[in-house]
Amino acid sequence: MRIRIVDAFTDRPFAGNPAAVLLFDSDAFPDDGRLQDVAAEMNLSETAFAHRLPAGGEADWALRWFTPVAEVDMCGHATLATAHVLHRTGAASGTVRFTARCGILTTTAHEDGTITLDFPASSLTPVDIPDGIAEALGATPLSVLDTSDHIGDLLVELADEATVRGLRPDVRALAAHSQRGIIATAAATDPGQGYDYVSRCFFPNVGIDEDPVTGSAHTALAPFWSARLGRPELTGLQASARSGLVRTALCGDRVRLTGAAVTVVEGELLFAP
C-alpha cells in the first residue's frame, strides 16, 4: 500500500504542514485501532485515510483524520494533502467531494496548482478571559472567543504580531482551557508583506504542542478577521517555525481555504492496516 507525505499550505518542500495520506482500494475503513497505529507510527500532526464511495452519492470519497493520539472531526491541511494526492495520481480531477465527521467537504483544483477547500465556518462566541490563560500563554489576551465543537479551540486575540511570534507558552497548562487547544492571533503589522493577520496554534489535548499550519483554525480566523477588517477575502500567515499561507474567503456560513501542496515522500506501507 502506497503512503505519501505531503507538505500542505506551501509551494516548497519542508515548509507548511506535513500530512501522511493513505488511499484504500476497499470500500470501507480498517479497524479504528489499526488506523490509530499507523497515525502514531507516522507521528505527524495528521494522517489522512480515504476510500472511494459508489458513484451517484453526495460524496466521492470518505475521509478520516488521526493525530498520533486521537481521531479529529476536522482537518484542513490533511484534506488539502489528500486532494493533492488524488489529483497528482490521476484518481480525481476538478472538484472532489468528501464525507467526513464534520459533514460534506469539497475541494477544487486550479490550473496554478493550488487547491480550494470549502469548509463550514466556525461559530464564534465571546467568553470571559479564563483565569490562568494569560500565564499559560505568556501574554495577556485582548479578547477570547469559543469556537464550534468541530474545532474545539479558544481563539485568543493578542496585542500585535510581535506578541504572537514571541509566544513561548506552557502547553501543558494550556490543555486545561479548551477541548483541543488555543489559536493565538493578531493583525499583521505590515499588510504590505502579503498577509492580513498572523496566528499560531497549540493543541496539547490531541498530542500536538504546536501545529505548523492549521486549516481548521482558519475556519474561525476567517470570520473573525473578516468582521474586524471589513473584507471577505484575506490571507493568513501561520507563524510557526515551518510557516505557511492560507488564503481565506468568507461565503455566508462557509469558508473557502486556498493553498498549495508538495509531495515530499512516497513509500510503501509494509504492514497493512
Image (cartoon, rainbow, N blue to C red):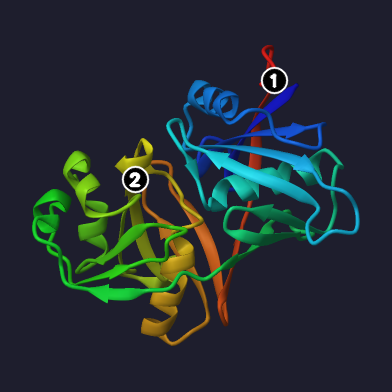
Q: Amino acid at mark 2?
A: Phe
Residue 234, above or below 270 = below
Q: Position of residue 41 (x, y in %)?
A: 51, 20
**Residue at the (64%, 50%) spot, across then down:** 80
Q: Quadrant of residue 251?
A: bottom right
Q: Position of residue 33 (x, y in %)?
A: 55, 26
Label number found at residue 203: 2
View extreme (bottom): residue: 230
- The image's mark for residue 267 is 1
In the image, taking residue 210 as reference, residue 268 lies left or right, namely right
Relative depth, front residue between 210 and 37: 37
Check disc 2: other Cα within 10 Å, few if <14, some if 14-19, many if 20+: many
Residue 206 vertical position relative to residue 37 in the rendered view, above or below:
below
Observer-side mark, 2 or 1, equals 2
Q: Is residue 240 left or right of residue 12?
A: left
Could you tell me residue 37's position as x and y percent? Answer: 53, 22
Q: Residue at x 71, y 54 (%)?
A: 98
* Outermost right residue: 55
